[in-house]
Image (cartoon, helix red, strand yellow):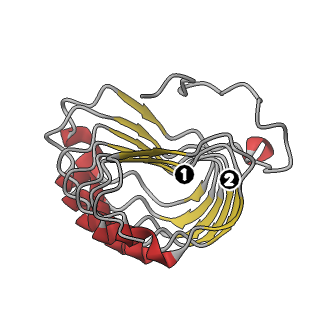
Amino acid sequence: MQTSKISQLLNLSSNLLNGTIPAEIDGFNMLQELMLSNNSLTGPIPATLGHITSLGLLDLSNNNLIGEIPPSLGNLSELTYLYLNKNLLSGAIPPEIRHCKDLYRLDLSHNRLKGRIPGELLSGLSEIRMFLNLSHNFLDGNLPLEISKMESVQEIDLISDPSTHWNPSQSQSQSHGVGQTVDHY
């Protein structure tokens, strides 16, 4: 299959998809928007997604994805919207995301992310107007000083209530919590 002529938009959200995201996804190198939300996808996020440098929107929310967020997503220099919320992602937030200088909305909420909020992430994104949602994870440590330098940020949600952690067996039509919006495009 010749993938270089594939459309710039691939929206397979809410299609009852299951299985893993194939590593060969990077063959869709002209994609500007990839939406695979509201499915039952499992396995890790392929690091090869970081090769699709034309991506402006990546929505993998509301699946059952596991493992760490690949640092290669920091290669997505055109990325403006990144939704990885409501999965089972673990590990630390990769500071490489700071290289996504055009990022407007970053939602990593309702996962199992641990560790501190990387100050280098916030300092790299300090000049942009964005929504930052890191709520409902297992983050710890002090808030980095860099958060006070995010003068253009419009909304930050860092709420952490272990009783409200995302359970993928819950209905996918569940309403969104405080600081979240249904229409995020």
Q: Is residue 88 visible?
A: yes
126 left or right of 74? left
Q: Which mark is residue 86?
A: none
| Residue 158 on image: x %, y % | 51, 41
Q: Quadrant of the N terminus?
A: bottom left
Q: In the rendered structure, which amino acid carries the disc numbered 1?
A: Leu
Give whichever of 126, 13 is nearer the camera: 13
Residue 162 image point, x, y percent: 74, 48
Q: Position of residue 127 (x, y in %)?
A: 13, 40
Identity of the amino acid at label 2? Asn
* Residue at mark 1: 60
User: Relative to the observer, which residue lies in front, 3 or 80?
Assistant: 3
Q: Nearest the camera: 143 or 117?
A: 117
Q: Is residue 95 visible?
A: no
Q: Which mark is residue 63?
A: 2
Indicate the secondary structure of the residue bearing disc 1. loop
Residue at image point 80% right, 49% down: 167
